[in-house]
């Protein structure tokens, strides 16, 4: 931020998008001080009205629903924008924000964008350029690196184990669930990919974060190579093709245009001393367990760190005699309402949304640069595009030898 920036006592947020992830962010903001949600734009009237009503119920401010993006950006009580709308809308949204700010029609001075930053490296680079050209403070919303377990585990490993035996050299990250909520996620040309783009963005960034020394820039690890593989294992089977059509509409036809529901990654980096460190990642929309499963590991010469979101302290058992409607009242992407169920006692905190938003609010409010910016979002997309190209061509991609700017994954090609 410029030297003439005046810190705010309270950051006033305008949300773009009012779907599932927007409500997750609202729940997390209950644990954040010095913030109000003062506006929301969604093209769907019922959704924006519902989100505004939820803000009031939670005591998070006086939120006005806006029928147009331009009206939200022109509001005199909105300081920062949270972009939470679907992937295909994000670049146009960022263009509108930058135009409104540079032309003086908007007082917005900061913007945060939900993962992934964009669908291609070209789009991601433009997102960053637009934020910088408009003089906006910017943050990339990657919740997993703000998970309470990740922050605590990284602190212990780097403070106690690394000085004694050396830096970590391998980080493993996996995220799996039974599939996304909305039809556009399942359409490669809309979302920009399948499970790899949707979920590997989490895995590679949280792993890169764990391997980066505290206080060091993420660029201290130099990206060298990427080896990826993708497959459609479950949702291209006839039974599940029909299930998707019934739930998501006929535009989602996996007999004709399937997206990958499984992806694997091996990404190599070089540390400050020229040593190789490795990220291993797996993601899937084909996992049927209690619900969303995130598993993380960090390995070094004489130590290991492990974390799983399904290894909860709280568990609930319900017998066959207990019946009820389907829902997600115990955990995200819940697949059952009976049996032994793990229950995260604070999903927003466990998954990292609370500390993520606390960090972004405080940085924007005081004019500091977040530790996760649009530049990191660009770096993530570069890795993902290298993985897609590796999977398409059946070879390891040496990143220095490739220009991935205009690469589009096969599943996203129209």
Image: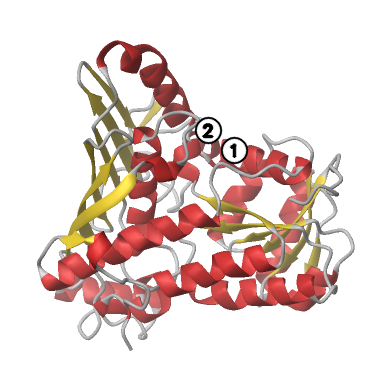
Of circles 1 and 2, which is in front? 1
Q: Disc 1 designates what residue? A: 354
Tell me where residue 91 sits by quadrant.
bottom right
Point out residue 107 in the picture as x, y percentages from the top left corner.
Answer: 84, 63
The answer to whether 77 appears left or right of 382 in the picture is: right
Residue displayed at 63% across by 44% down: 27
Residue displayed at 30% across by 35% down: 296
Q: Disc 2 designates what residue? A: 346
Q: Which residue, as the protein is rendered here, is positioned at the far front?
A: 273
Q: Is mark 1 on a helix, strand or loop?
A: helix
Tell me where residue 182 sits by quadrant.
bottom left
Residue displayed at 31% across by 73% down: 244
Point out residue 50 in the picture as x, y percentages from the top left corner.
Answer: 70, 62
Does residue 127 appear in the picture of this structure?
A: yes
Point out residue 82 in the picture as x, y percentages from the top left corner.
Answer: 65, 58
When the figure is inspected, residue 413 is found, relative to residue 359, above or below; the finding is below
Q: Distance between the residues labelled 1 and 2?
A: 10 Å
The answer to whether 58 appears left or right of 188 in the picture is: right
């Amino acid at each position: 931020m410029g030297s003439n920036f005046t810190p705010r006592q309270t950051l006033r947020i305008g949300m773009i998008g009012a779907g599932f992830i927007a409500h997750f962010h609202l729940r997390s903001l209950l644990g954040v001080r010095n913030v109000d949600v003062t506006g929301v734009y969604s093209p769907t009237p019922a959704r924006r009205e519902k989100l505004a009503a939820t803000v009031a119920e939670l005591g998070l401010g006086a939120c006005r629903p806006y029928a147009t993006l331009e009206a939200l950006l022109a509001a005199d009580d909105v300081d920062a924008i949270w972009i939470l709308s679907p992937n295909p809308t994000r670049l146009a949204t960022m263009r509108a924000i930058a135009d409104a700010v540079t032309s003086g029609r908007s007082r917005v001075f900061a913007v945060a964008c939900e993962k992934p930053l964009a669908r291609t490296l070209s789009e991601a680079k433009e997102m960053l350029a637009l934020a910088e050209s408009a003089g906006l403070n910017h943050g990339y919303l990657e919740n997993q690196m703000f998970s309470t377990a990740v922050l605590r585990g990284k602190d212990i490993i780097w403070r106690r184990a690394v000085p004694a035996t050396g830096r970590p050299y391998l980080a493993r990250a996996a995220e799996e669930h039974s599939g996304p909520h909305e039809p556009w996620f399942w359409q490669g040309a809309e979302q920009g990919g399948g499970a790899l783009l949707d979920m590997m963005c989490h895995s590679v960034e949280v792993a890169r974060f764990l391997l980066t020394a505290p206080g060091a820039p993420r660029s201290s690890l130099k990206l060298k190579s990427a080896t990826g593989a993708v497959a459609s294992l479950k949702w291209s089977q006839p039974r599940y093709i029909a299930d998707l059509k019934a739930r998501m509409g006929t535009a989602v036809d996996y007999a004709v245009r399937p997206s990958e529901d499984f992806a694997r990654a091996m990404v190599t980096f070089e540390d400050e001393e020229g040593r190789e460190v490795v990220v291993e990642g797996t993601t899937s929309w084909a996992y049927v367990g209690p619900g969303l499963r995130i598993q993380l590991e960090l390995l070094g010469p004489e130590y290991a760190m492990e974390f799983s979101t399904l290894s909860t302290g709280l568990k609930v058992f319900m017998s066959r005699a207990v019946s009820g409607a389907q829902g997600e009242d115990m955990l995200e992407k819940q697949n059952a309402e009976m049996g032994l169920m793990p229950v995260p006692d604070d999903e927003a905190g466990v998954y990292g949304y609370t500390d993520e938003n606390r960090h972004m609010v405080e940085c924007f409010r005081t004019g500091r640069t977040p530790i996760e910016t649009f530049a990191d979002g660009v770096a993530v997309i570069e890795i993902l595009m290298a993985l897609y190209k590796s999977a398409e061509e059946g070879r390891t991609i040496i990143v220095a030898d490739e220009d991935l700017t205009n690469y589009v994954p096969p599943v996203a090609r129209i």
